[in-house]
Amino acid sequence: MIGRFITTLFFLFLTATMYCQGFQFGAGLDYNTQNMDELKVLMDETFDVVSNDFPLQRTRNYPASYGYSVTAGLTPKTNFTVGIIYTWNSTDSKIDYNDNLHEIEFQHNISANTLGLTGTWRLNVEEKHQINYYFGFEGHFIMTKLNIGSMLILDDTRDANEFDFKGRSIALKPYVLVSGRLFSNFFLELKGGYLFDTEGKVFVDGNKDLFLVDSGGNTIRSNWSGLRLGLGLSFKISTRNTE
């Protein structure tokens, strides 16, 4: 279904290029922070229980991470661009313990595939600038995947378990962007913004009626809200005599 939707958008994009002043494609690397407070609490509860018997160590707890983004846009007006954007991001949390007889590991791996719409306004409206400044908004549909795994090796006994979860949410990101011409139609772009996530509930993969809960029975939500910084390269073509 998602593939059909993307294919439809692609053909609509090609059709729309005939009626716009230009179009562009871009790709970039992103530095992301994410909130994940409720999932951090869940890992803290695991730590508190198991650390009564073993001196566990916190290796990671949903640190800032790197991802990537791909965009395609149209310019119906000289100072305005609308387009679609795809992004991917992941992070994790881990606690473990290891000695000669025992090995214990608890780990969360979480990733987000997002598909969204973006609108960007150029602030300096004069044409043919080498450096341009923009303000924009992105609306995202976030598809979250969460894997929770544990491994216990006690003496000669080994026990490993994995559980898969999913989540869905909507997010909004305002941002600013600085674009500088490298050569010809290629531009280097620096982008900064903040993502506001609506925090979707995390449910068992294959059963949307079973949710991940904490020790108090409260439903756990993923929260991708956080700082977004990006460095990218874009290719822009004017189909009319504009910039």
Image (spheres, rainbow, N blue to C red):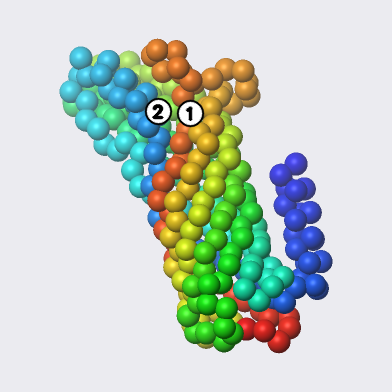
Q: Is 26 or 193 nearer to us in this picture?
A: 193
The spot of residue 142 in percent (x, y) is 57, 42
Find residue 10 and report its image quarter. Answer: bottom right
Which disc number belongs to residue 38? 2
Location of residue 184 with respect to 171 vertically, above or below: below
Which disc number belongs to residue 221? 1
Q: Is 98 or 130 nearer to us in this picture?
A: 130
Q: Let me know if residue 99 appears in the view.
A: yes
The spot of residue 54 in percent (x, y) is 20, 19
Q: Let me know if residue 30 appears in the view.
A: no
Q: Secondary structure at mark 2?
A: helix
Q: Residue drawn at (44%, 13%), measured in percent from left and top?
A: 217
Residue 82 placement, left or right of 87: right
Residue 124 placement, left or right of 236: left
Do tag 2 and tag 1 residues touch (Cβ < 8 Å)? yes
| Marks 2/1: CA–CA distance | 6 Å
Location of residue 190 with respect to 46 vertically, above or below: below
The mark tally for this picture is 2
